[in-house]
Every structure is written in structure tokens, then in C-alpha cells.
Image: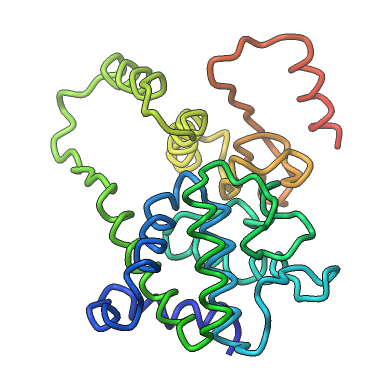
Amino acid sequence: MNHKYKLLRVYKQATNAEDLQSEIPDTYKDFISKIANNCTRLKGVYTVLITLLVHKTLNPDQDIRFHQAQIGGFSGRNIDKQYITPTLQELGLPAMAESGWLTRSLEQPKPYTLDYPGKIGNKSVKEAFLNLIDWVQKNPDKAELALRMLLGQVIQNTNFTKIKITKIENNARLNIKLIVDGLEEHFNFNYKTHGASKLPVLAFYAIYQILIEEVERYKLCTLKKLASHTASDLTSRSAGDIEVFDKNNNLFEAVEIKHGKKIDIQMIRIVKEKIVK
């Protein structure tokens, strides 16, 4: 069984954690809750911990504190990138763009012992993270239980923050001005979290999904799936935020969207370089 299928199996059991109450000491329950409650703000910590817990369930004899091959351990980053982060994304749970090990505070070539020097922003989260790793390392039979409880709380937190969008059945009262005003308010509202710069991209992508079907210019064209908004242009190798390809799979049109930024000559140079590449 690889890491993906192990994570999926534990995920299916995660919503019912009543039988775990007596299996995990209260101190470590509190640590798990601390990680779960910060899973969206500190995705790197939460992703790395899940990777280590999954790996421990599959390899009980592995010292998961040694998370890099160069310090005599295993490559946690490769496992995360190949199995864990893609699976979390598929499940609709908080996830990094590529790997939790891209977080500077977690990528240091030092073991995750209680004196780990990495400067994780939230001190109580760092304490919870390192203590949970230490506890599971000393009690390998608890790794799956801790993973199940952590996933259960993350699922609960994620479902709590979801907003149900009611489909508009009667669109007769809608007009262009009402829609544009609504989008503008949506784009500029302070949601007190990161990710606002992707809102215009999502809106224009939805518009292009309709254009592709209805406008003659885009006949036989396809719309490329949206890339991660946090991935760099070099990593994504894209010509813009939105890309349209013709029937021969050649790039036909690209749209670069900026949120709250005026177009200047430097921005034009960057766009030109992307198109040339």
C-alpha cells in the first residue's frame, strides 16, 4: 500500500473518532486540535505532519524526525509532493500548491526534535507539531490514531467554513450592470484571508467557459484547466492565467489578470517574455 491509499483509507474512517477518546492522552488531543485549527493558516505544518504520520503507519521502524535523506532519513518532500498534497487537493482539504517542505521554516536539514530551530510563525503550533512527532515516534502504534483524529477535525473545520451557494432559478432580473457591480464588490471585499487575487481569475475563467461554447471565434477551441495560482510562471510554464488552445492544441489566446495593479512597462515586458517562451 502506498501513501495515497493509506491516506484515503484513514480519511474514510476519520469522521467518527469517538473510539479514540481513551486512546490518545488529553495533552496530545489538544496538540492535534491546535494543528487542525490552524490548518488553513499554516498549511505547511499541517501537510508535513500528515505526511510523517502516514509514513509512520507504513514504516513503524522509521524515525520520522529525520525527514530528509541528507540527514540520514527519508525524503518526506518527495512523498508529500507525489502522494500527500495531490490527495489532499482531490479530497478538497486544505493543501499546499506543491509540498509543505517548500515552507522555509520546515525545510531546514535538521531533525524534527523538540529543539528544532525552524522559526514556525505560531509558537504554540510549533510546540504541538514537534511534540506530536516526538510522541508518535515513541509510540508508533498511535500514528494512525493521531492521523485519524487530525483528519476528522480538519474535515469538521473545513465543512464548517463552507458556504452553500444557492443557484439562481430565475435570471430575468439580472442585467450586466448588476453582475459587474456584484463582481467588483466581490473582488474588493476584505475577506481577511489570502487568495483574493484569484477571485477575478475564477470569474473570467467562468466567462471563458461560456465563450468557448457560444462564440464563433473559439470554435473547436479548448480551455486549459486552471493552474495553481500560487505556482510561479517558471513552474507552471504558462503564457497567462487563462489559456485557450485551438483544434491543433496550439496556444490561441492567453489572458493575464492583475488584481489592483496598474499596467506598466515592466509588466508588459514580463508578458512578452512569457509569450515568446
Residue 259, image x, y percentages = 54, 21
Q: Is residue 37 above or below residue 254?
A: below
From the viewer's side, name the closer residue of 244 and 120.
Answer: 120
Residue 174, image x, y percentages = 21, 24
Tell me the quadrant of the picture where the C terminus can be found: top right
Residue found at x 60% / y 89%: 60
Q: Is residue 214 above or below residue 146?
A: above
- Left/right placement of residue 215 relative to residue 274 reads left
Q: Is residue 74 above or below residue 213?
A: below
Residue found at x 48% / y 31%: 204
Tell me the quadrant of the picture where the N terminus can be found: bottom right
From the viewer's side, name the closer residue of 119 and 89.
Answer: 119
**Residue 186 appears in which quarter of the rendering?**
top left
- Left/right placement of residue 163 relative to residue 253 reads left
Residue found at x 67% / y 43%: 231
- Left/right placement of residue 120 relative to residue 36 reads right
From the viewer's side, name the closer residue of 245 and 85.
Answer: 85
* Residue 112 visible in this rendered orientation of the protein: yes
